[in-house]
Amino acid sequence: MSAIHNEGELLVVITELALEGEGVPPPRVPLILYKNPFQHTKSLQVSQYRCSSCSSILKETTEYIDIHSLREECPQCGSMLVDTLERQQFKPRLQVPQFQTADTLLKFRFDIPKIDAFLGLASTDSCCITGFNANLILTRLSVRALLPARYGGLNSPYVMVADTGNRSDVYGAISFARQYGMSKESIANRILVIRAFTVPQVWRLLSKELPLIIQKYQVNCVVIPGLLNTIDEEPNMRVKEAKKQISKIMKKVDELSRRILVVTSIQQGKYTKWVLPEFRKRIELTNRKDGRITAELYNQGNQKTVSLSGRELKIIPKR
């Protein structure tokens, strides 16, 4: 199923994956692929695909790719791959990975200077944002994660929005895409939205569907708006059962964050204060009477308070 939005002359289609995955054509998977340095390929014929326009190596694989049928753009320079993609045979060598320090791992930023000065995210990490305009920051990060690494992104072929609170923002994503100079059509095709409306659906989404989607589509970032909404909106759920379900959900979020970056939002509710300390990195936003926003930043036990304007949340800094 697809959510279709008409914005002027632009027809934006956000692909939505049904929970059962039936009847939904898979989105085109871009050519970027991360190499496994320990993969044994001595007996296999490996092809290397590179863009002749920017010389970027996009994929190394044993599979044959029909270049003439491609419709994708190069994720690095934007040229049409049907015109610039080249194939050549090569023999991969075993590479020993370099150890990285904590500073080099914290490569993903919010692109909000006052927050970035204190709080950074790793490619395998988790962060929770709550309060005023929390989902605006989630939308901003979902677009930013698609950027190439040299521009501060995660170079993620796709971003998965696991919408458990019916809060995904198509037009907000388009606004940030424009500011980053990205193709709106490309953004629409690369942000995958899957929704869950009940507690059992949220559990199935986190435990069954997401791990499969992450593996199949090379997702590097999962955004979860309204993590506890289904529990907060269940009037007949007892507190003991609610805490049991929340513990199960948090366990799955922790498991996912060991593989990729997970960013979620939580609206204020009776279980918010119980869950927030589970996130060692989090942002709590409060709207002040003077129109500014107070952001309480938490980073691995350290805390800092900064004051932000609405413009700082909505507008990308000029480079």
Image (cartoon, rainbow, N blue to C red):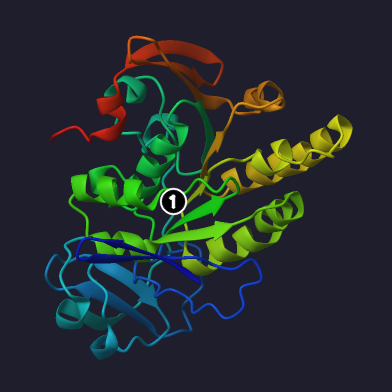
Q: Quadrant of residue 271?
A: top right
Question: What residue is shown at x 66% (from left), y 57% (from top)?
Answer: 205
Q: Position of residue 188 (x, y in %)?
A: 34, 62
Question: What residue is shown at x 69% (from left), y 61% (from top)?
Answer: 208
In this rendering, is residue 213 above or below 103?
below
**Where is mark 1, residue-wise?**
97
Q: Position of residue 278 (x, y in %)?
A: 66, 28
Q: Is residue 142 left or right of residue 165?
A: left
Kindly tell me whether residue 100 is visible in this rendering: no
Question: What residue is shown at x 58% (from left), y 25% (from top)?
Answer: 280
Q: Position of residue 80 (x, y in %)?
A: 17, 75
Q: Amino acid at mark 1?
A: Pro
Kindly tell me whether residue 119 is visible in this rendering: yes
In this rendering, is residue 60 above or below 78?
below
Q: Position of residue 33 (x, y in %)?
A: 39, 66
Q: Is residue 281 left or right of residue 35?
A: right
